[in-house]
Amino acid sequence: MIADVHTSLGTDFYLLDELLTDEERGIRDRVRDFCDREVIPVMGEYWDKAEFPLDLFRKFAELDICGGSINGYGCPGMSKLAEGLLAVELARGDGSLNTAFGVHSGLAMGSIAILGSEEQKEKYLPSMAKMETLGCFALTEPDHGSDVVMLETFAMRDGDEYIINGKKKWIGGGTYSDIAIVWARDASDMEVKGFIVETDSEGYSAEVQTGKMAKRAVWQAEITFDNVRIPAENKLEKANSFKDTSKVLTATRYGVAWEGIGHAVASYEAAVQYAKDRKVFTRPLESYQLIQNRLANMLSEITHCQLMAHRLAALFEEGKMTGGMASIAKMSIAKKCKQVCSDARDILGGNGVLLEYLVAKHLADMEIVYTYEGTDIVQSLIVGREITGVQAMAPSRKG
C-alpha cells in the first residue's frame, strides 16, 4: 500500500528519520537548533568580511559533539550515522564553521585517536573535546597539492627531540590552533610520519591565506617550520607510513560526503521557499512547470545522496568501509550537491547572488567541497584502483 502522505515532505522524502535512534535524532536536532539560532543569522557577514568567528566556534563545546564517534577521553562516542548527520547540519548552517570543526574534531582529534599512543590520547583528547585545546592538520604543501605523499617537510631525530623543517599550505586553523598534527618525512628512513607540534614552539610561523572566493570565513594558513624542536615522544606512535596517514584521510572523507548534503539541503530549502514567495508574471514561481521539474530533480539528487550516505554509515560502523567506498561517496555526492546548489541559485535569479538569500554562499563553498580531501579525479582513481588493482594515480616512469 502506498502511504497517503502530504506532498510537502521537505528534504527527508524517503522518511529516513524513522530509521534514527533517539540519540541520533537528538544530536541532529541539537545541532540544527544551534545553527538556526546562532550560526545562520550572522555567518553571511563573517563570510563577506573573511573573518573567522573564534568565539562562536568555541561555543560548539556546549553541544558535546567534539570527537564525534571517538569513545572515551571525554568524547561523545556517537554513532557513525550521528557523526554524518552532524556534518549535514553544520554545513547547512555554514560551510566555513563546518570545515573548522572537521579539522579540529575529525582530522586533528581523529589522528590522535587512530594513531596516537594511550599517553597521547589521555594528554590531548580530553581538552580538545572541551575545545580548550584546538588542533589543526598540516599535510598539504605548496608545490604538491593532491600529490600529498611527496612531502618535502622533514623531521630529523636529534637525541630526545625531532627537528622539523618545511612548509605547509591550506592548513585550516593553522593560525589559531594550539597544536598541529604535522606530517613529515623522517630523514632516517624517508617514511611519512605524524608529529604533534605545539604552535607556540620556536620556529613555527603561520600566515592567513587571503583572496579566497569560497569558505571565506575559515582561515587557512601557510605554515613555515624553521628548525622546530619537539620532544621525541610527540611522534604519533602508530603513524609510520603514508598508509597510516590514509587511515585518517579515509575516515574524514566520509564526513566530507555528508557535508555536501548539508549545502544541498540548505540551497534546496531556500529555493523551495523562494518559489513559494516570489511572483513572476502575476503567478507564484512554484506554479510553473519548469520550476517544479527542477525542484523535483534537485530533491531526487539529494535523496540519492542521503541513501548512499546512510548505507556508507552502516558499512563504516560495521568496519566494512573501504577507501574506495568513501571515495565513491565523496565523488558522487559532491558532484550531485554542487549541481543542486547551482540549480537553486538559478531559481532565485538575480537574488541568487545575494548573501542574504544564502544560496550563493553555499554554491561557492561547494566548490571547495568538490576539491578538498581529494579532487573528483583523485577520488575516481582511488575507486579505479579498487576496481582494477592497478595504481593509476601517477604516470608510470620510463626507463
Image (spheres, rainbow, N blue to C red):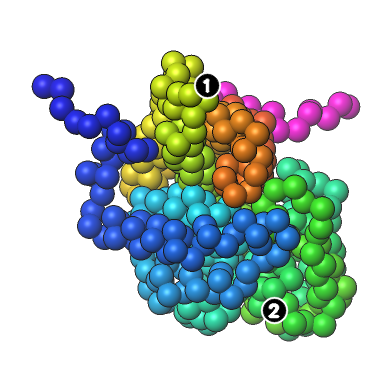
Position of 88 relative to 8 (above/below):
below
Q: Nearer the viewer, residue 33 or 143?
A: 33
Q: Foreground mark, 1 or 2?
A: 1
Q: Height in image: 135 above or below 281?
A: below
The quadrant of the picture occupied by the N terminus is top left
Q: Position of residue 360 (x, y in %)?
A: 63, 42
Is 288 situated left or right of 5 in this image?
A: right
Q: Name the residue located 59 percent from the left edge and 49 percent from the top edge.
A: 356
In-image side of 72 versus 354 (left or right): left
Q: How many marks?
A: 2
**Mark before the other along the chain sequence, 1 or 2:** 2
**Is residue 216 found left or right of 336 in the rendered image?**
right
Give residue 337's position: percent from left, percent from top.
Answer: 53, 34
In this picture, is 11 found above or below 20? above
Q: Main secondary structure of the magenta part?
A: loop
Locate residue 274, reporting x and y percent. Answer: 48, 36
Near mark 2 (Cα within 10 A), the count class, few <14, some 14-19 or many ≥20, is some
Which residue shows up at 30% across the image and 34% down it? 8
Q: Which residues are magenta?
A: 387-399
Task: Give the percent coordinates (x, y) of residue 52.
Answer: 67, 66
Q: CA distance from mark 1 to mark 2?
A: 61 Å
Quarter holding the C terminus is top right
Q: Nearer the viewer, residue 301 or 8?
A: 8
Q: Amino acid at mark 2?
A: Glu
Q: Which mark is residue 198?
A: 2
Asked whether residue 393 is drawn in magenta, I would say yes
Quick one: SS at disc 2? strand
Residue where numbered disc 1 is placed = 281
